[in-house]
Image: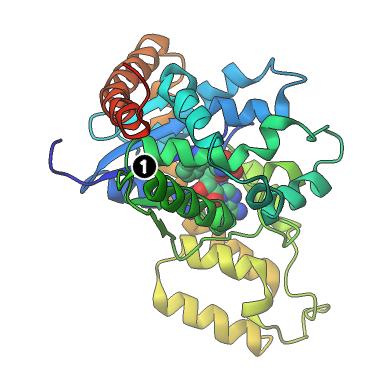
Amino acid sequence: MDGKKKIFSGMRPTGKLHYGHMAGALINWVKLQNEYDCYFGIVDWHALMSDYADSSKVAANCQEILLDWLAVGVDPNKAAIFIQSHVKQHAELHLALSMITPLGWLERCPTYKDQILNLQNKDLSTYAFLGYPVLMAADIMLYKSFAVPVGEDQGPHLELTREIVRRFNNFYGDLFPEPETLLTPSAKMPGLDGRKMSKSYGNALEIADDMETVWNKLRTMTTDPARYRRTDPGTPEKCPVWDIHKFFNKDEAELAEIHAGCTSAGIGCVDCKKKLMVHVEAMMGPIHDRRKRYEGDDKALREILESGAARARKIAEQTMDEVYAAIGLLK
Ligand code: TYM
């Protein structure tokens, strides 16, 4: 692995993963694992930041995420797959970075304000939740990740990470690279109601959903609101189903046909959705087969997490030695 550039990315175990996770991040991970030394963390401390009052599902959600990752093609023989809390250095670096992070940076972070507004059923006015991006910076910096494959919503967090890197390097010497953001073409996949696909909005198509469930959800999915009747012409660029088509449908000629059919009212929304289903089934079939193969194989799953954590720990220990030396703490 030496000599290869390193990449970290992570996902919160707050439930099963959905098509947005796959389109915005996982397809990139599956490609990047062939070229780079990749570290993919199931970030359970981050899940606790919002779910601390009922932590009963965090452990089970970690297993579900692991299954979803393996199903989509994240390969434990290439990437290190592990649970964030199994590599203690994440918490350690988080503490070190909290020393240098100005409160104003965190208070101004747009995702902080959004989350407080959107998740009003949870009390998020905690010390840890304000520091959410600091732990995220620690995750990334621990592996000196040169780039981070994420969806568009993580942009502000990565900007903050770069600021924390600059501040650390300024105080203690150049130790960390400023990580780039790596986006996919579907960096913001819409959900059934047209808003960003998100578990907390209840508008998600889950990776584990069977095809009947997917069709039942898709059938009622919002389309271009101007296409009120079948005879009204539509604008695909205003239709969230079109975004999903662009991810699943690689047949350029058919896409052009659908585009023309929509704008001329030649085809209806149900026809368009039926065409989409063919491509969803083709992509999800092998994914579901792989998920089934791992389901229940607790021994294999445990081994993947143990060897992933061991690999991650090696790098994490090395980085923390350098951090202590750079700050100048007594050995
Ligand atoms: P999380 O768990 O909310 O989402 C995981 C990844 O999926 C992407 N994503 C989407 N992309 C496109 N369209 C969507 N509708 C969609 N929904 C989710 C997210 O952008 C993300 O890439 N803070 C992070 C977890 C994290 C992390 C890190 C990420 C913790 N430490 C270090 C990278 C590096 C989060 O909450 O992602």
Q: State how the image is colored.
A: rainbow
Task: Check disc 1 and report the residue beneath it.
Answer: 172
In screen coordinates, is 143 left or right of 102? left
| Residue 19 percent coordinates (x, y) | 55, 49
Where is residue 53 shown, x and y percent of the image?
A: 77, 20
* Residue sitting nearer the eye, 194 or 293: 194
Residue 79 visible from this viewpoint: yes
Q: Residue furthest left?
A: 3
Q: Give how far across and how far down residue 123 sits, in percent.
A: 83, 32
Label 1: how many Cα within 10 Å (few below 14, some 14–19, many 20+): few
The quadrant the N terminus occupies is top left
Amino acid tagged 1: Tyr
The answer to whether residue 94 is left or right of residue 213 is: left
Is residue 210 depicted above or below 106 in this figure? above
User: What residue is at 50 percent from the left and 62 percent from the top?
Assistant: 186
User: Is 300 or 281 nearer to us in this picture?
Assistant: 300
Tell me the quarter of the picture where residue 331 sits.
top left
Of the pair 102 and 114, the residue shown nearer to us: 102
Residue 214 to residue 47: above or below: below
Outermost top residue: 299
User: Residue at coordinates 40% horizontally, 22% vertically from top-left?
Assistant: 294
203 to the left or right of 167: right
Q: Residue furthest right?
A: 121
**Residue ranking furthest to the bottom:** 264
* Element marked by disc 1: helix
Q: Is residue 112 above or below residue 85?
A: below
Vertical comparison of 231 with 6: above or below: below
Residue 277 in the image, given as x and y percentages of width and height: 55, 57
Could you tell me which residue is drawn at 69 percent across and 66 percent down? Answer: 270
